[in-house]
């Protein structure tokens, strides 16, 4: 299935140490190989390199903080049926989140766990969450920002379906305003990842340093060691796949191109739709095929999913694994520039050959629509 397995017992901690160390020695921080940049095989110690090195170390620290928060969230999610947690699942906390949805106490607890871990870590200048209207101020001297959806798909939690945390790290200049977190294309994301709380707890991570895109790795949480352990390196999405994933109930609200592509999928592929983005995208990453949340007639034709902390990290993982992610016929998700931190964008992602075909279908439908318009 296009995945290089590596069952070494390396923990996330050790992986990040190795990555930082490899960068310091002059290599791609996300692999074990190093490249020589100076006569003695190390960095040349310029001020610029020192600054980048500090950023790489800070970034590793932010990823560690998110992983710690996710381990905590995973332990709570796993106990979802037990009385104390059930009260959090069922108990709406009386407030409504920024999207007008009733906010469950569990979403809020997951948000708090992430904010607390990042605040304690102290490397982030800004912290943006699906569950917070405002972007949270961190350390004003920090150069990084972390964006996340603390508990995506939480409406599925009572039936035991996989839910997840999605996150991304961006580099903001020291002293930059909160808007620096989102007024930029999705392609600016550095480290990205998600944690799937499913049959096991899986962290999928692409750690970036020195602005070189890292490979995609998967870690499985080991309760006994309270650690994420590296279980797959260099994950690659298959070039095409036999599965498509979309909420068919919305089909009458899609544009003609999306309908045409999905009609083709109905005839040639198998449908799998959990309704939980992390679980649906994780399956797509491993088995290939496509996942869609298209623009539809609701939400001003923008789709449902949020650009900054849902679509961008997921699109980045998929692209770094060799796949594609588009908003429309010829627009990459990672070229989209949001105007608010909670902006929505349409998303189609998955195997490169399948998404290319979709892109051609969308373009053909748009051209047909234009010619009908001009001929009438
Ligand atoms: P949430 O952020 O409120 O949990 O909503 C996001 C979820 C995604 O996980 C999933 O892809 C999508 O909503 C499913 O939406 P729908 O029920 O409209 O198919
Ligand atoms: Mg969400």
Image (spheres, rainbow, N blue to C red):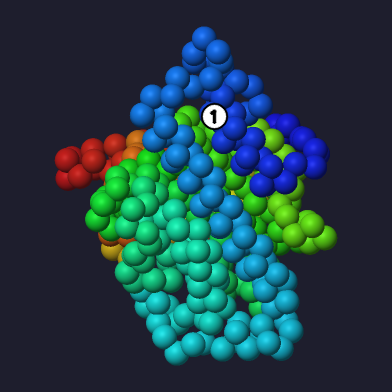
Q: Nearer the viewer, residue 225 or 88?
A: 225
Evaluate whether residue 318 shows in this view. Answer: no
> How many labels, in total?
1
Lateral position of residue 322 relative to residue 221, left or right: left
Which residue does the numbered mark 1 point to in the structure image? Answer: 23
Q: Residue furthest top?
A: 39
Q: Is 289 located above or below residue 122 in the figure? A: above
Lateral position of residue 228 relative to residue 310, left or right: right
The picture quadrant where one finds residue 198 is bottom right
Quarter that holds the C terminus: top left
Q: Is 57 located above or below residue 26 in the figure? A: below
Quarter that holds the N terminus: top right
The picture quadrant where one finds residue 290 is top right
- Give the image location of residue 255, x and y in percent: 36, 52
Q: Is 309 located above or below residue 233 in the figure? A: below
Evaluate whether residue 229 shows in this view. Answer: yes
Mark 1 is surrounded, within 10 Å at the Cα level, by few (under 14), some (14 to 19) or many (20 or more) other residues, namely many
**What residue is drawn where x is 71% and y is 88%?**
83
- Give the image location of residue 216, x and y in percent: 60, 38
**What residue is drawn where x is 49% and y is 15%?**
37
């Amino acid at each position: 299935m296009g995945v290089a397995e590596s069952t070494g017992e390396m923990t996330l901690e050790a992986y990040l140490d190795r990555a930082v160390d490899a960068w310091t020695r002059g290599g791609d921080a996300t692999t074990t190989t190093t490249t020589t940049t100076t006569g003695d095989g190390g960095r040349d110690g310029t001020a610029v390199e020192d600054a980048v090195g500090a950023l790489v170390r800070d970034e590793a620290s932010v990823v560690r903080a998110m992983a710690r928060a996710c381990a905590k969230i995973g332990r709570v999610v796993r106990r979802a049926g037990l009385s104390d947690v059930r009260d959090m699942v069922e108990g709406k906390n009386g407030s409504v989140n920024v999207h007008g949805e009733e906010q469950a106490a569990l979403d809020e607890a997951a948000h708090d766990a992430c904010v607390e871990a990042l605040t304690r870590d102290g490397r982030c200048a800004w912290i943006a969450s699906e569950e917070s209207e405002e972007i949270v101020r961190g350390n004003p001297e920090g150069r990084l920002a972390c964006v996340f959806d603390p508990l995506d798909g939480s409406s599925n939690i009572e039936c035991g379906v996989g839910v997840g945390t999605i996150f991304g790290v961006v580099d903001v200049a020291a002293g930059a305003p909160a808007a620096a977190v989102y007024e930029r294309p999705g392609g600016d994301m550095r480290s990205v990842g998600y944690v799937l709380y499913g049959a096991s707890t899986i962290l999928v991570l692409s750690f970036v340093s020195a602005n070189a895109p890292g490979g995609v790795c998967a870690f499985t949480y080991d309760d006994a060691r309270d650690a994420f352990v590296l279980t797959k390196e260099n994950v690659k999405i298959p070039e095409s796949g036999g599965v498509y994933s979309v909420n068919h109930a919305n089909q009458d609200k899609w544009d003609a191109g999306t309908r045409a592509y999905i009609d083709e999928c109905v005839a040639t592929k198998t449908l799998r739709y959990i309704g939980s983005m992390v679980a649906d995208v994780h399956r797509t990453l491993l088995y290939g095929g496509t996942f869609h949340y298209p623009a539809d007639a609701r939400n001003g034709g923008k789709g449902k999913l949020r650009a900054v902390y849902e679509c961008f990290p997921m699109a980045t993982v998929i692209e770094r694994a060799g796949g594609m992610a588009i908003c429309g016929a010829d627009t990459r998700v990672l070229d989209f520039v949001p105007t608010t931190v909670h902006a929505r964008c349409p998303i189609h992602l998955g195997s490169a050959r399948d998404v290319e075909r979709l892109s051609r279908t969308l373009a053909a439908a748009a051209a047909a629509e234009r010619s009908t318009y001009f001929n009438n």
